[in-house]
Image: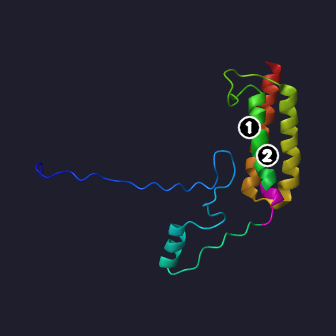
Amino acid sequence: MADEPEEEKTYEVKDKRRFKADGSPREDAQLHEEPEDQAQAEEAAGGEPEKPEEMPPPNVYALLGFMSSMLAETAWQLMGIRLSPGQKELFKDLPQAKVAIDTIVFISDKLDPHISEEERSFLRGLISDLQMNWVRQSQG
């Protein structure tokens, strides 16, 4: 094996970028077409190309639940209990924390008839924890 000459490996580079550095489209670029290998893979699998899934209709209740969790995290940060991303020190802004907590209470009231008992219990516990910690932080 040591006596056999090594074959020089060669590579072919294909520039598949659709745009030039200045932002103008390349003349040989294929815009809005599937890559050949993806189309071939779908044909080999014996099926038609996958159609994109339809987006489900908006769900306000899910959005309000998400907003509640975001407001809760913000309230913890504003009470000086959790460190905000990108910050090196805790800080307090209790008036803003109160607005966040009050908003969670409002959202919870709107969600109440539309969520499960487990979710309802979780929200009540979260609100209770936030309110008790707000009182502790405002006294100390």
Residue 60 highlighted magenta (yes or no): yes
Please give the label number shown on residue 47. Answer: none
Between 64 and 9, the residue placed more toward the observer is 9
Q: Would residue 45 be seen by someone viewing this image from the given angle?
A: no
Of 137 and 76, the residue lying toward us: 76
Quarter of the image with the C terminus is top right
- Where does the image place residue 53, in percent across and percent down from the top left? 68, 69
Circle 2 packing at 10 Å, graded few (<14), some (14-19), many (20+), is many
Q: Residue at x 49, y 72 (%)?
A: 41
Query: How many discs mark residues in the rendered view?
Result: 2
Residue 61: say if magenta: yes
Say which amino acid is labelled 2: Ser
Q: Nearer the N terminus, badge 2 or badge 1? A: 2
Question: For the magenta stretch, what is the residue range?
Answer: 57-62
Q: Residue furthest bottom?
A: 46
Q: Which residue is mark 1?
A: 73
Q: Position of residue 13 (x, y in %)?
A: 45, 54
